[in-house]
Image (tube, grey):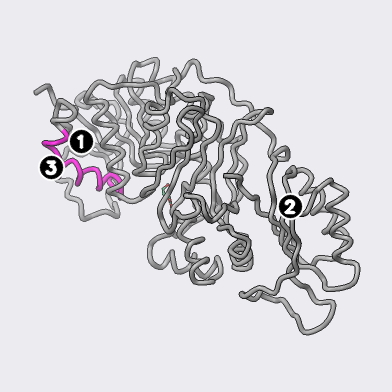
Amino acid sequence: MANALKVGLAGVGTVGGGLLQLLAARGDALAALAGRPIQVVAVSTLEDRRNKSIDISAFRRVQDPVALANDPEIDVFVELMGGEGGVAKASVEAALRAGKHVVTANKALLAHHGTSLAKLAEKSGVALNFEAAVAGGIPVVKAIRESLQGNDISRVYGILNGTCNYILTRMERDGQSFAEVLKEAQAQGYAEADPTFDIGGFDTAHKLALLTSLAFGTEVSFDSVYIEGIEAITPADIEAADDLGYRIKLLGVALRTDSGIEQRVHPAMVPKHTSIAEVDGVLNSVAIDGDFVGEVVLVGRGAGGPATASAVTSDLIDIGRGHILPPFGAKASSLKPYKQAEMRAHEGGYYIRLSVYDRTGAFAAIASRMAEQGISIESIVQRRPRVELPGLDRSHKGSPAAVVMITHQTTEDAVRRALAAIERDGHVDAKPQMIRIEKL
Ligand code: HSE
């Protein structure tokens, strides 16, 4: 058998630990697949790493990840530390410059610096593989980069964050508020102590930016992603969605339009009968629309040590086989500049929930503001939610009532203008809630 593929591993946390376990458990089978043993020769990890159950005493320790990236013994630098800059960026750049292949799960790094790192990999003739960076164990990078190459892709979308999907699923099942479920999820270790990246939609946006480049052959453009998180979703919205035949999911959507590419992350109403609506809990799902293949939907574990290690391992096997492709499918030097479609030009149906003072003329004023913007209303109902809205006093006439509207196809710009006018008119006692209805 050929010489071992020698790996330097930076980061022995959940994913790094999972990788060491997988390589130990399946070493012979992997060697047979790769045509050579895959051997970790050195690791770089924090002294006070959390994942103490993994024994790393057999490996040479290199304290500085940049030194590990330059280590003459290694062929591949596996970066599992995370972080959009700092030592992760410095060490990945060092490895690529030194002619080492790189495997990383670091979506933040690639979302911000993917194009320049891909160019560096191309210049050095090495791999920059990142299957684990998008939807953990789901093999979506390979699916787009290799298996769907024959297609013109028009859209890629998905549930790309398990924490958000878990919270929305629990809110729906238990009727609990966002804050209550988040607190419980943190106590059980499902959500990070600082959950901002997940619940604010940023983690989804990092992954979406990578999917966009893979699908459309464009430079990575994280700054063009429109981002809304799930913090403002209430049990009243989830209940109304249910009655209307929808479920609410945090989606990442990249869509080619006549005016450019939309990249957006926001809670969306998805019809209950669609496959994405049925993806619950911490699972992720990615759907790809190709002109010849039609829709392809992948579902699986988007996080966790074993699932993410599975993705890292497949990248290592490819390198072992000498199967080296441009990181984003198209050659890095030929990635097209990203042309952004403005969010205000987005077209679709909208769910709008207003807390309206229950008085004569309020409905009429709202309807006329919508009409002024050319928005056609599909339905409008005054609702008494099964779940009470906090602070909603129904004891006397003139107190606010929940009004839910569904619009026909319109533009984001029209909806925003109409809602601003409705707020100015003073018939509502809170900021209007607006959730986009995704056409699937
Ligand atoms: N924190 C992510 C999630 C996994 O909740 O899905 C890593 O991106």
Label 1: how many Cα within 10 Å (few below 14, some 14–19, many 20+): many
- Apparent side of residue 304 relative to residue 226 in the rendered image (left or right): left
Which callout, 2 or 3, points to the residue nearer the camera? 2
Label 1 near ligand 1 (CB < 8 Å): no
The outermost residue toward the right is: 361
How far across and down, in percent of the image, does residue 340 sit? 64, 30
For label 1, the SS is strand
Q: Quadrant of residue 352?
A: bottom right
Label 3: how many Cα within 10 Å (few below 14, some 14–19, many 20+): few
Which callout, 1 or 2, points to the residue nearer the camera? 2
Give the spatial CA distance, label 3 vs label 1.
9 Å
Relative height, residue 384 to residue 292 (above, below)? below
Discs 1, 2 touching: Cβ within 8 Å? no
Q: Amino acid at mark 3?
A: Ala
Q: Which residue is mark 3?
A: 58
Q: Is residue 334 visible?
A: yes
Most foreground residue, 190 or 361: 361
